[in-house]
Amino acid sequence: MADLIDTVAVVTGAARGQGRSHAVALAAEGADIIAIDRCADIDSIPYPLATKDDLDETVRLVEAQGRRIVPVVADVRDLDAVTAGVRSGVDALGEIDVVVANAGVVAIGLKDPLDTEVYRDIVETNLNGVWHTIAATVPSIIRKGRGGSIILTSSAQGLVGKGGDGSAAMFAYAAAKHGVVGLMRSAANAYAQHNIRVNTVHPSGVGTPMILNDHTLRTFQENPNGAALSANLLPVPFVEAEDVTNVVVFLAGPKARYITGVALPVDAGHAVM
C-alpha cells in the first residue's frame, strides 16, 4: 500500500538526477509534486545544468504514476522566486506535507583558490538555497496542521573533508554541505512542536549528470588522486540515485515517524573514519 496517498511534496532540483528520481518515487507512493528547478546553466559551474525539457520529462514521469504535478522554474538562490513558486503549487495542489531540498551544484576540477564567483554560486545554491526552501515551505506545513517531513540533501562532504584540494570550489562545497547539517539540526528543534521532522541524507558520488559529465569525468582521468571524492569502502565507484531515493521515501513516510535530527549517510562507506 502506498504510504503517501493524498500528500503534497516539494522537490527542488527536480528536473533530472536525484531530484527527478525522488519526485517520481514519491508520486508512486501517492504524493502530488511541486517540482522546482532553475532550468538554466550557471556561468561559474563547469557542466550543463538541467533544462526545461528535462523538467517536462519529470512532469511526464510523475503523471505516468497517476499523480498531479506543478512544475516551477525558479532558482533556489532567489527566496522570492521560490516562495512564489511554492505558492502557485499550493494553490493548485493544497498544503504541503513533504519537502525534499535537493538542488545543488559542484565544481570538481576548478583549482583556483581565489575564485570568488564559484565559491559564492556554490554556497548560495547548496546552502542558502536549502534555507530558502525551508523558509518557503514550512508555513504551509504548519497551516496544514498534521506534521510533515523535511529531507535536506547534504553529502558525504557534509560529514568529512575527503577530496579537499585548497580550491575555492571544494571549500565552498564542503562548507555548504556541512552547513546543511546545521540547518537541519536547528530546524529539527524549531519545528518539532508542529510534528515536523527534519533530517539530512549524505550521498557520496551519485551516478547522475552532476558527476557523469564530460568535465568531471575528464578531471578524474587527468587527476587519479581526485578519485578520493568517490573512494567508497564498498566496491562501487558511485551510488545510484535510486539508493538515495529509497532513503528519501522512507524518511518522508510514516515508517520514519519518530526519526528527526539525523544525518544519514547513503555513501557505500565513504565517510567511515
Image (tube, rainbow, N blue to C red):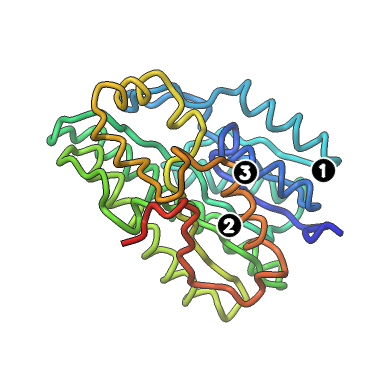
Three-letter residue code for mark 1: Arg
User: Residue at left 21%, top 45%?
Assistant: 164
Tell me if mark 2 has few (under 14), some (14-19) or many (20+) residues whose alpha carbon lies within 10 angstroms of its own.
many
N-terminal of the pair, mark 1 or mark 3, is: 1
Which of the pair 49/137 is nearer the observer? Answer: 49
Tell me if mark 3 has few (under 14), some (14-19) or many (20+) residues whose alpha carbon lies within 10 angstroms of its own.
some
Residue of label 3? 242
Residue 113 at x, y percent in the picture: 13, 36
Q: Residue furthest bottom?
A: 193
Mark 2 and mark 1: span between their CA atoms? Answer: 20 Å
Tag nearer the camera, 3 or 2: 3
Three-letter residue code for mark 3: Glu
User: Residue at left 40%, top 47%?
Assistant: 232
Picture disc at residue 137: 2
Which quarter of the figure is the N terminus placed in?
bottom right
Three-letter residue code for mark 2: Thr
Secondary structure at badge 3 equals helix
Tell me if mark 1 has few (under 14), some (14-19) or many (20+) residues whose alpha carbon lies within 10 angstroms of its own.
many
Residue of label 1? 67
Q: Is residue 27 left or right of residue 238?
A: right
Q: Are marks 1 and 3 in contact (CB under 8 Å)?
A: no
Residue 101 at x, y percent in the picture: 52, 51
Which of the pair 272/52 is nearer the observer? Answer: 272
Mark 3 and mark 2: span between their CA atoms? Answer: 25 Å
Q: Is residue 220 left or right of residue 24?
A: left
Q: Is residue 263 left or right of residue 53?
A: left
